[in-house]
Amino acid sequence: MASDDMVYCKRGCVYALSFVPVVGAIALVVAGIVVARPALTALRLHQAECTVTSSSIGADVTCKCPLGRNCRSTFPCLEIAVLYSEKGRNNSTYNVSGTGHNTTGHRSLLVDTQGLFGRTPQCAVRPCGKAADDNSKEVADYWESWGTVGQQFPCFYDPDHDAEVSRTVIFSSKWAAFHALFWPLLLIFLSLAAAYFICYRFHCWCDDGTWND
């Protein structure tokens, strides 16, 4: 193989051995955060009944837009406090201000899905479109729909981490976690195998290699 051909061949092998696996690794991390983690959390959730005890909109939160490397936006932080109760579980009794009656349950903060568990600050929804006005409208609409004091609806909580409860559950199947991890791992494995075969086929790592047809 000519010297220039050897250089190009080696570069091609380096790109083949690194580019696709790197893309697969990025996909694995993203899928793990966006799909696998909420799916595993969903397996631990118990259904309960939530009663809104208070709600308010606080300071704006700065966020990174999903599209655009340097895109930054803001949304107002909506905090909805609830009492949640489940049949067969010991509950405390509280007076819900503005409703004129007592409600039993455990104090917690509401978030829209279990994918928002553990975020700081604890906001019920976290819209992060490029236009801050659209984010504010989405938060206001959510507040109107789910933030009325005394309002009741089904919700879901994690017995081991009940500081937050989820209004809805996403990726509730264990197969969602499996697929989120399996396909990126398969991509990494197949790309490495293919790159190794191509480099081995053309002896790209040997200075005295030759092209074999």
Image (cartoon, grey):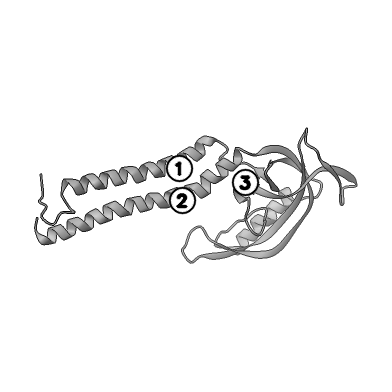
Q: Is residue 21 visible?
A: yes
Mark 1 Cα-neighbour bin, 10 Å: few <14, some 14–19, many ≥20: some
Residue position marked by numbered label 3 in the rendering = 114
Residue furthest to the top = 88
Q: Nearer the viewer, mark 2 or mark 3?
A: 2
Q: Position of residue 139 (x, y in %)?
A: 67, 56
Q: Position of residue 48 (x, y in %)?
A: 73, 38
Per the rendering, the mark at residue 181 is: 1
Q: Position of residue 157 (x, y in %)?
A: 69, 42
Q: Amino acid at mark 1?
A: Leu
114 lies left or right of 69: right
Q: Amino acid at mark 2?
A: Val
Residue position marked by numbered label 2 in the rendering = 29
In terms of sequence position, does the residue under pointer 1 or pointer 3 come before the other?
Answer: 3
Q: Nearer the viewer, mark 1 or mark 3?
A: 1
Locate the C terminus by quadrant: top left
In terms of sequence position, does the residue under pointer 2 or pointer 3 come before the other?
Answer: 2
